[in-house]
Image: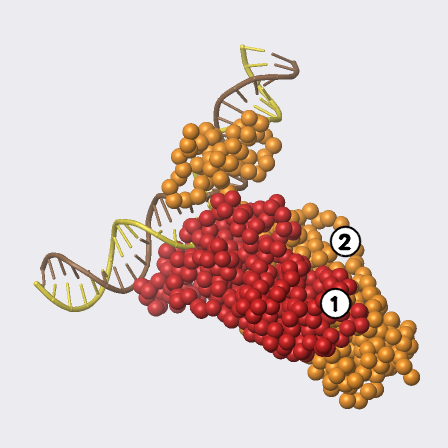
Chain colours: A orange, B red, C brown, D yellow
Amino acid sequence: MTVELPKGRAPSIRDVARLAGVSHQTVSRVLNNHPSIRESTRARVLQVMEELQYRPNRAARALSKGRSRTIGVLSASSEQYGPASSIAAIQNAARDAGYYVNTANLASGDRESIEAALNHLMLQAVEGIVVIAPQVRVFDALEQMSIDVPYVTLQSTGRQSDHALSVDQIAGARLATRHLIDLGHRNIYHLAGPQDWIEAEARMRGFLDEMGARDVPTTAPILGDWTADFGYHAGRELLRMRDFTAIFSSNDQMALGLIHAAREAGLDVPRDLSIVGFDDIPEAAHFWPPLTTVRQDFAELGRRCIALLLSSLGGEAEGYPGTIVPELIVRSSTAPPAF
Amino acid sequence: MTVELPKGRAPSIRDVARLAGVSHQTVSRVLNNHPSIRESTRARVLQVMEELQYRPNRAARALSKGRSRTIGVLSASSEQYGPASSIAAIQNAARDAGYYVNTANLASGDRESIEAALNHLMLQAVEGIVVIAPQVRVFDALEQMSIDVPYVTLQSTGRQSDHALSVDQIAGARLATRHLIDLGHRNIYHLAGPQDWIEAEARMRGFLDEMGARDVPTTAPILGDWTADFGYHAGRELLRMRDFTAIFSSNDQMALGLIHAAREAGLDVPRDLSIVGFDDIPEAAHFWPPLTTVRQDFAELGRRCIALLLSSLGGEAEGYPGTIVPELIVRSSTAPPAF
DNA sequence: TTCACAGTTGTGACCGTGCACATGCGAGCA
DNA sequence: TGCTCGCATGTGCACGGTCACAACTGTGAA
């Protein structure tokens, strides 16, 4: 027996209902696992759904329930390993929780671009926003546009503690700095990330805290842009005066550029110069020399991020997971200073 | 004067209509830039929208028009530079065209995982799908699930020419191979990508074509998994018998691993061993030695991909852009063989 | 004057789903 | 028997847009 298919459109619950000999509401109940459905009825409905290749219409559901089940991700430099990993993890976690994810990329860091991206997300009626970007400016924009969906960022911000995931970037940076100090270094530079990225700020804070705690004098951190190119050029500048024996770089890519510059200047890493990175990208173990760095679990970060956002969406407020502490991975780019 | 806001819900076109003293249909026409609207009416409506902070409801629009304006991206290894760059470009291009993008990540390459991802996308009523994954299996799944939305992949597949973007990966691979042959190498290995990735296959084909055209005998390519780790381990295996003087790696990460293995074995790159990569990731210029590689314009790829998909969606079938030819970037990881 | 016509605006139905409420039915109990 | 109660199911409407069609206006030509 062939079923009569509706002409152009996709089958709706009413089509299913008609063929199963029930009301559309019964079909809806089957879809939503309502308890009071006779088993035989449920089976019949499910069978018709199968025959018709029925798929619920998300737009209709969203319209009727007033909820989009969509989470927005506002991201910058999403082609880099760290952000990309987090985004992937966020998408997986959201999908497991029955949510959809929409990503808006920042063309640049200016207000106009941020507003465009936020508008794009708001037009889709996202229920929450995850920020992976220069958060300071984004937060300003969020407030100024009077956007009232909950938002979350991957790093703690200090001023927005409710929205923050407490990944202890500061502890990670202290770990890296302590490692250098313990090796005997006293003249240590810090190559930081862009100014208003929270990660960059937290890592810088960790560096300064540890240096202060150990009474090691510091120089002003250099603000970079996360790229290997920047690390290379900054390295060339720095190496004009060799008044340091170690550098703590705010991410692995810039560390790679630094190593490149050091080698070009005829220095051996780690004999003449120790370098520590941050992130532990998969390539870091294969740099030459293999990079000592601080491992971040980006995937776990993404998962917790979604957990936090969902609990903030009024869902099951499951116990808030504790702080993630990054881990120092010692490889071969660090050694005691040569005197 | 304060406007009377509707209580809980967001304002709808009917709220705007009431306050502007027009019908809801007139508001709709303003939204859709209908030509026959008196300028004064349009201005009044726009002003009320501004006052009410009105935002159109995407779900309602999608429901009534029967179009979701959403494109799905099916992606694997989306945390790697190449895929991540393409995804970002796709998102930007789609946004510019007024589309939304939803990404589904493949947990693994098995059929179950692919079907779950495709289901996720279909539940959102995506109008088209971009595939950045082991396409062979995904295409099988697409056919078997009788999914009838148009789909596109970043690379030409041979058998699915309608859905393909003709980026000449083969030409890129030939460029790399030719470079090695021209330097004088005759014993060249190829470290390929995973078996059913179209990119991997195309690059392998280019390698074999060029070797054949120059009458250089070849050995069977080694199938890798795109990671630096794999390149490292494959390199250690290969270097047990040093019956080659050059390797063409299917991407830059594996090339990095190869260099690592070569150095550990006491070989100098490029004096004892020449290595060519593929992609030109931003870090490739800072490897040691800086990597000779084939540059792909991932962003352009993403843009054209969306252009193709949109034209396939029946939109403005704008002239199909020509083939992108990758470019060989010669750095310091290649040299004539030492005899 | 009358009519055709273009420009501008309004009316009501419809898209697919979920909710509130109503209804039918059988079991348990006084 | 009559009543209550809980399960299983049905009816009608709301959600916020768009579409088809109707209606009203003013203008120019016959």
Using residue A7 as the reference point, say whether residue A212 is left or right of it. right
Give the residue at mark 1: B242
Note whether A249 is above or below C1 in the view shown: below
Q: Residues within 10 Å of mark 2 (few under 14, many from 20)?
A: few
C-alpha separation, residue under disc 2 versus residue under disc 1? 52 Å
The picture places residue B150, in percent across and down from the top left corner, at: 46, 54
Q: Toward the viewer: A144 or B64? A: B64
Report the amino acid beneath label 1: Arg
Give the quarter of the figure containing the C terminus of chain B.
Answer: bottom right
Label 1: few (<14), some or many (≥20) within 10 Å? few
Is disc 2 in the same subunit as disc 1?
no
Q: Which mark is residue A321?
A: 2
Q: Amino acid at mark 2?
A: Pro
* Chain assignment, label 2: A
Q: Which mark is residue B26?
A: none
Q: In percent of the image, x 42 and y 66: which residue is there?
A: B320
Location of residue B188 in the rendering, given as x and y in whole percent from the top left corner? 65, 68
Q: Nearer the viewer, mark 2 or mark 1?
A: 1
Observer-nearest residue: C8 or B57? B57
Q: Is residue B60 visible?
A: no
Q: Is residue B184 visible?
A: yes
Residue displayed at 81% across by 61% down: A325
